[in-house]
């Protein structure tokens, strides 16, 4: 019984019924003009349904009046783009008009029938109602009184569900809109993955430097070295906070440009940070690094940052060679360090996967692994 009465307590039950009544406002205006031609509103809907903006208006109404919680996406609010969308909108308008007529009749006649049954049961028969052709009273008619009201209740719920199902089919997203939504969702996922890589590279590098510096300072027992280590930790922490602010800015402002992210022209900052952590870094820069396109230069910076982070995390303060080369229409990034026993640490393998993913997205290639007694990260990216 509770399940049967549940629709009575849903707001959409009444908004859907009101949605069916809305076209009758237009019909009632026309009936004041010429009651002998009630079919004219259906004809006038034909040019109206072919207007692209009408589909947007119908979609907005459907979202507010037909949708239950979480179903808003089932109705498109974009204007008609193709003729298929226009014909779907026109068919929807005609069905909605017919549904309005049915809803109007069902709203009026069941209460009238119930009232007539009460009149007949109390000894006041009438002959004006064609649905109750009774000429003599009888108390038993009172037993039939609930039936018209139950029919009205069923009609309100049933027609509301039916018009909602039809609206999903005719006002739902078209194939082109579904494709656009899928592309937008894909872009959002790619952006989230990029932000995750940004946080992994920046914060991971800062934490690795801080851990290595703190460990070296504790082991050295030299106040001067400890001061230098704390200074390096402070500088690296500030840089990490700046990177974190950039990433959070992207999250807060979807349209914020990414030009403020560091590029390869700022690679010296990474090299100095690695040297301050105890690594002996020898760098070789060949070619005009400043001419590398912005997106490529920013991703190259992150690749270099992750490579140096892996050196500090897994090899410690060993000699490392960094080569940045811009030549023959390509950007080459190479980081080599001596192979040592791996130092246990978190995130093992995820950084190398991130490097390979970045290279693949940029149309390049990456090689990682042992090479002639060294550990090598070699990345080649096309400039175009």
Image (spheres, rainbow, N blue to C red):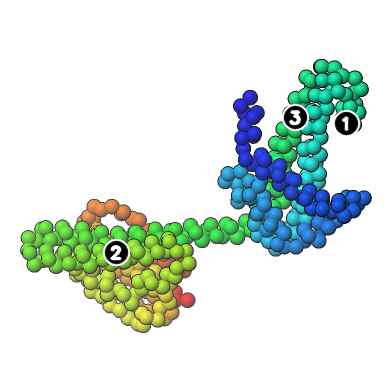
Cα separation, mark 2 vs mark 1, equals: 82 Å
- Residue occupied by mark 1: 129
The structure residue drawn at horizontal position 78% and vertical position 45%, both measured from the top left corner, is 100
Q: Earlier in the sequence, mark 3 or mark 2?
A: 3
Q: Label 1 neighbourhood size at 10 Å, few (<14), some (14-19), many (20+)?
A: few
Q: Position of residue 159 (x, y in %)?
A: 73, 39
Residue located farthest toward the left when viewing the structure as drawn: 222
Between 138 and 203, the residue placed more toward the observer is: 138
Q: Which quadrant: the N terminus?
A: top right
Cα separation, mark 1 vs mark 3, equals: 16 Å
The structure residue drawn at horizontal position 40% and vertical position 64%, both measured from the top left corner, is 249
- Residue occupied by mark 2: 240
- Nearest to the eye among marks 1 and 3: give it: 1
Indicate the quadrant where residue 184 lies. bottom right
Residue located farthest toward the top when viewing the structure as drawn: 139
- Residue occupied by mark 3: 149
Q: With 325 as the anchor, is 113 left or right in this view?
A: right
Cα separation, mark 3 vs mark 2, equals: 69 Å
């Amino acid at each position: 019984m509770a399940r049967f009465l549940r629709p009575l307590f849903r707001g959409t039950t009444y908004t859907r019924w009101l949605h069916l009544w809305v076209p009758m406002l237009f019909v009632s205006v026309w009936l004041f003009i010429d009651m002998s031609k009630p079919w004219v509103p259906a004809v006038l809907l034909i040019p109206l349904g072919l207007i692209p903006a009408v589909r947007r208006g119908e979609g907005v109404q459907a979202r507010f009046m037909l949708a239950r919680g979480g179903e808003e996406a089932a109705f498109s609010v974009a204007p008609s783009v193709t003729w298929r969308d226009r014909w779907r909108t026109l068919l929807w308008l005609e069905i909605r008009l017919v549904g309005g007529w049915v809803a109007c009749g069902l709203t009026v006649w069941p209460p009238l029938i119930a009232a007539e049954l009460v009149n007949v049961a109390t000894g006041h028969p009438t002959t004006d109602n064609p649905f109750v052709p009774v000429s003599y009273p009888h108390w038993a008619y009172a037993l039939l009184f609930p039936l018209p009201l139950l029919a009205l209740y069923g009609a309100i719920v049933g027609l509301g569900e039916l018009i909602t199902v039809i609206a999903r089919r005719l006002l739902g997203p078209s194939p082109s809109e579904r494709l656009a939504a899928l592309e937008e969702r894909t872009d959002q996922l790619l952006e989230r993955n990029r932000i995750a890589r940004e946080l992994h590279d920046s914060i991971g590098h800062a934490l690795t430097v801080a851990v290595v510096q703190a460990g070296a300072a504790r082991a050295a027992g030299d106040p001067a070295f400890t001061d230098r280590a704390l200074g390096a930790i402070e500088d690296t922490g500030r840089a990490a906070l700046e990177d974190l602010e950039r990433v959070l800015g992207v999250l807060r402002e979807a349209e914020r440009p990414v030009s403020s992210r560091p590029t390869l022209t700022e690679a010296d900052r990474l090299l100095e940070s690695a040297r301050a952590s105890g690594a002996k870094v020898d760098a070789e820069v060949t070619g005009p690094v400043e001419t590398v396109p912005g997106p490529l230069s920013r991703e190259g910076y992150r690749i270099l940052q992750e490579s140096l982070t892996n050196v500090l995390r897994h090899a410690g303060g060993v000699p490392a060679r960094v080569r940045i080369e811009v030549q023959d229409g390509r950007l080459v990034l190479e980081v080599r360090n001596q192979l040592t026993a791996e130092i246990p640490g978190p995130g093992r393998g995820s950084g190398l996967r991130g490097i390979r993913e970045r290279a693949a997205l940029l149309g390049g290639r990456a090689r990682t692994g042992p090479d002639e007694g060294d550990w090598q990260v070699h990345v080649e990216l096309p400039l175009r």
